Image (spheres, rainbow, N blue to C red):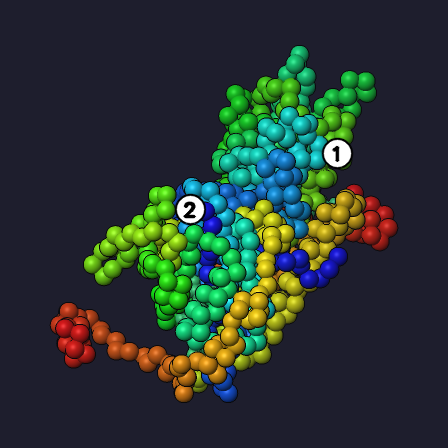
Amino acid sequence: MSFVEPEERVALRQAVRDLAKRYGPDYVRRQAKAGLKSTELWDEVGRAGYLGVSLPEEHGGGGGGIADLAAVGEELARAGCPLLLIVVSPAICGTIISRFGTEAQKQKWLPGIADGSFKMAFGITEPDAGSNSHNITTTVRRDGDEWVLTGQKVFISGVDESDAVLVVARTKDAATGNLKPALMVVPTDAPGFTKTMIEMEIAGPEKQFQLFFDDVRLPADALIGDEDAGLLQLFAGLNPERIMAAAFAVGTAKYALDRAAEYAKTRTVWRDRPIGTHQGVAHPLAQAAIHVELAKVMTQKAAWLYDSGDDFGAGEAANMAKFAAADAAVEAVDQAIQTHGGNGLATEYGLAPLLAATRVTRIAPVSREMILNFIAQHTLGLPKSY
Amino acid sequence: MKIVVCVKQVPDTEAEKRLLPDTLTVDRESSNPVLNEMDEFAIEEALKLTEAHGGEVVVLTMGPDGADAAVRKALSMGAHSGILLSDPALAGSDAVATSYAIAQALGTTEYDLVILGSEASDARTSLVPAMLAERLGLPQLTFASKVEIDGTSITVNRLTDYGHDVVQAQLPAVVSVVEKINEPRYPSFKGIMAAKKKPVAALDVAAAGIDAALVGQAAAATTVVDAAQRPPRSAGVKVTDEGDGGVKLAEFLSAQKFI
Ligand SMILES: Cc1cc2nc3c(=O)[nH]c(=O)nc-3n(C[C@H](O)[C@H](O)[C@H](O)COP(=O)(O)OP(=O)(O)OC[C@H]3O[C@@H](n4cnc5c(N)ncnc54)[C@H](O)[C@@H]3O)c2cc1C
Ligand SMILES: Cc1cc2nc3c(=O)[nH]c(=O)nc-3n(C[C@H](O)[C@H](O)[C@H](O)COP(=O)(O)OP(=O)(O)OC[C@H]3O[C@@H](n4cnc5c(N)ncnc54)[C@H](O)[C@@H]3O)c2cc1C
């Protein structure tokens, strides 16, 4: 791994920045306020091939890696116009289908996921299975050639703008009666599929939903990959998810620090010196910048490990990156708001919504406590407490 | 059809530009070099024309070694190959010398059409396209807001203060485009990956057949004698509207001789 990104990734970042510059935070705010989605931005990013960078070329992708997709996610967030569903549609669903789907499934879904014309949400969380995802009870059973899905999910992002949801369900082992995870592609217009929006204090255009599956009938090809390899497949998709969440947090943190630095350079309170000359203002921002950069390097390491095929090594690094990036983002946003004084909470400056947006990254897709559990157990070899 | 697009690398348009105190040339280290924005419209138009009529797009730049980044950007948008004209002797060339150097470099390749931006965002003389056409002895169709090719004939809408003129010529010709003409594409990820593998020919003065005595700062017909920082913007006048805002505005405008 080199600490200098390859020329192509630098060019990719620049290209995404140039595109995102035309949208920015005003666009996202406007869309959210009007109850609309970031459709134009999503479509344009998709058309340019940036959503599909990590997917295979033969299925409409760019043939790059998660490191490339993370660069796209980070730059969009840094421009103040993040796309939450980039974490889900190409990173989780695209990865899982491209790694474990049949050739026919890849042809069916990947080109659309790659160019953005087909959006796939991801549903694992249930009311009684958040941190404890082993607890999921949504089940799928065979009925002739078809599958029948029953159960519910909660906090699933972007279902109203998605064509399908990749649902983590369980199948009953015929022999033992044990439940095994199975990944099912569920079209959002399938009969028996209903959704209810959850009111959230997050200002973005992407909404969260509670989903109910009431004997939803699915075709045979709805099952992704192997009925027996569900868990392994699932983890293959969750590492990219964490890396993308980290990239989102890093980008948002950088956006907040950019705003803070700009403000601290121009706002004068005492005589003619800008507040940035006061170390009480400058040092906390500098410290946040250090933490953000450390988190970014860890994110790059995780992506590099993942792209080199080391799923287990990537697991530890992706968890550490997400943990560090979430904390750095919360710190950066808090300090950016502090730097702005009262303006930090004024609508015009657009910083207050970042409080919720970055706070989420400490909880989802996996909470910081569960990451600490993982590190304690796997990195330090400590006994499991739960 | 073979189209050559001339592009210039310029300091980042959004950055504060500085001059080097001793040579009074642009301090290129002080800000990010980028592809001149107007030239992206020239590249886009060339790509559209070759998509419609077949052919290839060659991108040509004269600049320091690092200017190959501008060529790569054009290649990532879809241009097929590049020519980088670079030589210490060219440093500080003015528009007259730049047009001469580009004309000589064009002599190393064949083309049916040359497309330029109508203005570089740093020096902003808008002279190079016309001078280049003159040097090549080719028709110049400048400030084009629309380009159409039919066989060997080219027709452009030439932007004017009152609308546009329709100008027609035979190929080969030199065209400069305005921003109105199209919407430049973003380099696709595949384009970015492919750009690295596309051929870029390096030319120095000798290879381009340029007489070194005619280029560079020493040969420039114009000299920058002095430069001063633009004074910071003054606070301006605030008119508080106490029911007579309109009158006060009119008074201000007439005092400044605007009305
Ligand atoms: C904005 C948003 C978007 C989301 N989008 C999606 C989505 O698209 N798809 C999806 O499937 N899910 C989504 N989620 C759900 C998210 O993944 C869960 O909220 C998260 O995994 C935490 O689960 P929970 O909410 O059930 O918390 P709980 O599991 O109830 O945990 C509550 C608290 O207890 C702590 N805790 C639990 N167990 C332990 C332990 N053993 N040791 C120490 N502490 C513990 C947790 O860390 C947490 O702080 C989203 C959530 C949010 C907020
Ligand atoms: C601060 C400053 C100091 C300068 N000092 C001097 C000086 O001391 N003496 C002097 O004589 N001149 C000087 N110049 C002028 C400078 O050399 C000119 O910028 C240059 O000759 C090209 O002219 P232009 O940028 O105005 O191009 P324009 O005519 O505005 O550009 C139009 C189009 O021509 C093409 N083009 C322009 N340049 C190139 C290129 N290098 N390669 C390929 N295509 C190109 C592009 O398509 C561009 O869109 C100075 C400029 C500046 C900003």
B160 horizontally vs B203: left or right: left
Give the residue at mark 2. B49
**Which residue is at a point 70% across and 35% down the rendered structure image?**
A99
Which amino acid is tagged 2? Answer: Leu
**Residue A284: horizontal and vertical position, in percent?**
60, 71
- In what element is the residue under mark 2? helix
Between A83 and B87, which is closer to the camera in this rendering?
B87
**Residue A336: horizontal and vertical position, in percent?**
53, 66
Which amino acid is tagged 1? Answer: Leu
Disc number for residue A231? 1
Chain containing the residue with disc 2? B
**Residue B197: horizontal and vertical position, in percent?**
63, 52
- In what element is the residue under mark 1? helix
Between B71 and B93, which is closer to the camera in this rendering?
B93
Q: Is mark 2 within 8 Å of ligand 2?
A: no
**Which residue is at a point 67% across and 28% down the rendered structure image?**
A103
Are labels 1 and 2 on one chain? no
